[in-house]
Image (cartoon, rainbow, N blue to C red):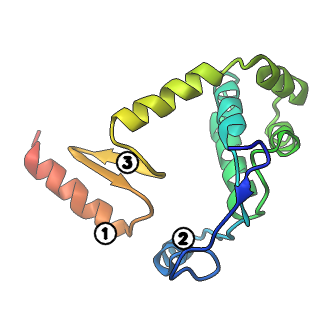
Amino acid sequence: MPPEGIPRTPKTGEVNGFQPHMTEIAAQVGLKLIRSSIVPNTRPALEIAEYAREQGKFDQFHLATFKAYWEETKNIGLRSVIRDIAGRCGLDADEVDRCLDEGRYTQRVIEQSDNAHRSGIAGIPAYVIGDFLIEGVQPYEFYQRAMKKALEKHPK
């Protein structure tokens, strides 16, 4: 994936860039989804998420990155965007540059990705409930059924 990302190709059945059920589910929990015209190279953002984790600011950075991408359609693969998000989260933007220039977290992110693929995970979000791997946006009831089946299979 090039640093600037690649143009997104719309898929059949999408409305405003999403399958209809996705925007319905998002709206139910108060999320606003706007599809970016770019598929970003997320590796740098994932690397800085690891820096944020070490600084005790993972959740803040994670949520700000999601908001920038899903609500503001920002290209979270661009260093300038990542620096801005990090700065708003109280992280040192110059340290962001050093982390990316040195590749400080590159191997960790590669290993995480490899582990996910070996586990059969090919998409996000992904959850494991009991023996069930659930990928993609699903209705709340779907998770309830999976949890019920997992508890039936593995009672305490």
Question: How far from the left and from the top, in percent, is residue 60?
Answer: 69, 41
Which percent across, then down, holds residue 2? Answer: 74, 43
Q: Is residue 150 above or below residue 23?
A: above
5 lies left or right of 122: right
Assess disc 1: are there few (<14), some (14-19) or many (≥20) residues with their C-alpha within 10 Å of its C-alpha: few
Mark 3 or 1 closer to N-term? 3
In the image, what residue type sits under mark 2? Ala
* First of labels 2, 3 by sequence position: 2
Task: Name which residue type carries label 3.
Answer: Tyr
**Amino acid type, mark 1:** Glu
Can you tell which of label 3 and label 1 is closer to the viewer? Answer: 3
* x then y, percent, for residue 32: 65, 71
The residue depicted at 59 percent of the width and 83 percent of the height is 15
Residue name at image x 82 percent, y 21 percent: 101
Q: Quadrant of residue 50?
A: top right
Residue at left offset 40%, top offset 37%: 117
Classify mark 3: helix, strand or loop.
Answer: strand
- Which of the 4 quarters of the picture holds residue 107? top right
State the separation of the CA atoms marked 2 and 1.
14 Å
Q: Quadrant of the C terminus?
A: top left
Taking the image as shown, residue 102 lies to the left or right of residue 154, namely right
- Along the polypeptide, which appears first: circle 2 or circle 1? 2
User: Mark 2 sits on what residue?
Assistant: 26
Look at mark 1 in the image and give the residue it sits on. 141
Q: Which residue is mark 3?
A: 127
For the N terminus, the image quarter is: top right
User: In the rendered image of this protein, does residue 50 appear above or below residue 146?
Assistant: above
